[in-house]
Image (tube, rainbow, N blue to C red):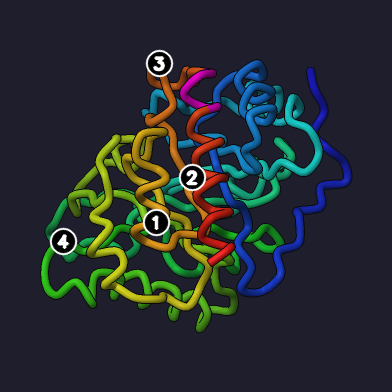
Amino acid sequence: MVPPRSPQTPIPVPKNVTMFRVKICGVTTPDDARMVAAAGADAVGLNFVPGSPRSLTVESARLVAAALPAGILRIGVFAGMEPAAARGIADRVGLDAIQFHGHLFPPPPGAANPCCDPPEVCRDVAPFPVIRACRLRSDGPATAALEEARGWVAAALAAGRAPAMLLVDAGAAPGAAAASLGGTGVVVDWVRFVAAGDPGLPVALAGGLTADNVAAAIAATGATAVDTASGVESAPGKKDPERVEAFVSRALQALAARADR
C-alpha cells in the first residue's frame, strides 16, 4: 500500500498560464511513469474512464502517482463521473488537477445518452484546477469550430468557476461512449484549429500527435502545450521509451523555437 500525498495540496495555477508544456496521457505503470518523467515531460495523465484500455483502479493509480518525482503534474482524466467521486479519487491518489473528457452538453431529448460533464463540475471539484477537453466542430464555418467550448466555459464561469485550461482533442460523434472519446490516434484539423481563434484560456493541442508530427503541429498552430497517449505507445496503455523520448524532445524543441520568435 502506498499512501497518498498528505496533506493534498493541488498545485496552484496562475490565471492565464499554461499548466504544462508536454503531457503524456494514459500512463499505467510506475515504470512508465518514471520513464516519462526522465524523458522530460512535465505532466502525466492517469485515466479513470471505465472501458478505456488505459483505465486505472485507485490503488494502481496511487502507485503510478507515487513513482513520479516532485514537479510533475499528476492529472486525472474522467468522463461522466459524479464530481464528488472524481474529487474523492483525486484526494486519494494525490492528483494535482482534474481533466474532464466527457461531452460538453447533454444530447437532445430522444437521442443517445452518452456521458456528459456539465459546466458546474469546475465548481464542484474545487479546489482542484480543471482541464476541459473539447472537440472542434467539423461542420459549419471554421471560425465557429470552438463555439460549443466557449459556451461551456461561459456557463462554468456563470456557475462559479471556470476551467484553468482547454485541451482540444480529435472530434467524436455526439453519441460516442466515454471510452472512445480520447486516445484514438485521430489527428485534429490544424487549419480549423487556428481558424477557430483564441478561446480566452490556455490551450493544449492533442489528437493524433506523434514524434513525427508534433513539431509540425506546434509550428502550424502556435500551440504552447501538447498532449499524446496512443502516439507514444507500443500497445494500448504501454508506453514505448523510444517514442516517448522522441516525442518529448521534439515537442520541447519546437515549443522553444516558437517562444524565441
Q: CA distance from mark 3 to mark 1?
A: 26 Å
Label 1 sits on what residue type? Ala
Of the numbered discs 1 and 2, the one sitting upstream in the chain is 2
Helix, strand or loop under label 3: strand
The crowd level at tag 1 (other Cα within 10 Å; few <14, some 14-19, many 20+) is some
Quadrant of residue 134 within the rendered picture: bottom left
Cα gap from disc 4 to disc 1, whole angstroms: 22 Å
Horizontally, residue 72 falls left or right of residue 9, namely left
**C-alpha distance separating marks 3 and 2:** 23 Å
Identify the residue at horizontal 53%, vertical 55% (top origin). Answer: 257
Q: Say what amino acid the circle numbered 3 marks.
A: Ser
In this rendering, would 121 be left or right of 139?
Answer: right
Instruction: Report which residue position mark 3 lands on.
Output: 234
Dot 4 or dot 2: first in sequence order is 2
| Residue 50 visible in the shown view | no
Residue that label 2 marks: 78
Q: Which residues are magenta?
A: 241-245
